[in-house]
Image (spheres, helix red, strand yellow):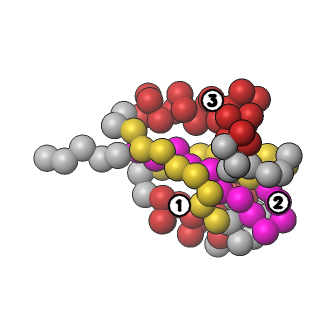
Amino acid sequence: MQKMQWFVYVIHSDEGLNYVGMTKNIKRRIMQHNTGTNKWTRRGSGWKLIYHESFDSTDEARAREKYFKNNAGREWLKRRGYLWSCLYLS
């Protein structure tokens, strides 16, 4: 039996907002963000995937998601050119 991968992802909206999350299905999750089923991303539109990483366990993915949601993680993403806006949603 194949183990499901967890993904930590960063998406960016047309309005300049960024969002960090984790999921097992990136394609489905971005569709949910773009159709307004996620309360935190409803104020944005045109969400696009700008970065993602995969993990074998929920714990690893959750730790990386938490890192990207703090200042050090945001700076890590900015230094690599993934973030260009200062507006974040968690």
Would you say residue 13 sits in the magenta stretch?
Answer: yes
Q: Secondary structure at mark 3?
A: helix
- SS for callout 1: helix
Horizontal side, residue 61 vs residue 48: left or right: left
Q: Which residue is mark 2?
A: 16
Vertical position of residue 38 compared to residue 63: above or below: below
Which comes before the other along the chain, label 1 or label 2?
2
Q: Which residue is mark 3?
A: 67
Label 1 vs label 3: CA separation? 20 Å
Residue extent of the magenta highlight:
6-17
Mark closer to the chain start, 1 or 3: 1
Dividing the image into 4 quarters, which one contains the C terminus?
top right
Residue kind at label 2, given as amino acid type: Gly
Name the residue at 73% across, 42% down.
78
Looking at the rendered structure, the kind of residue marked 3 is: Tyr
Q: What percent of the width, then of the height, locates residue 37?
A: 64, 64
Give whichever of discs 3 and 2 has the lower sequence position. 2
Do residues under tags 1 and 3 come within 8 Å of each other at their CB atoms? no
At x 59%, y 46%, the residue is: 21
Q: Nearer the viewer, residue 34 or 72?
A: 72
Image point (39%, 39%), residue name: 55
At label 1, the amino acid type is Arg
Residue 63's tag is none
Location of residue 59 in the rendering, given as x and y in whole percent from the top left corner? 44, 28
Whether residue 35 is visible? yes
Q: Within 10 angstroms of label 1, few (less than 14), some, or many (20 or more) residues?
A: some
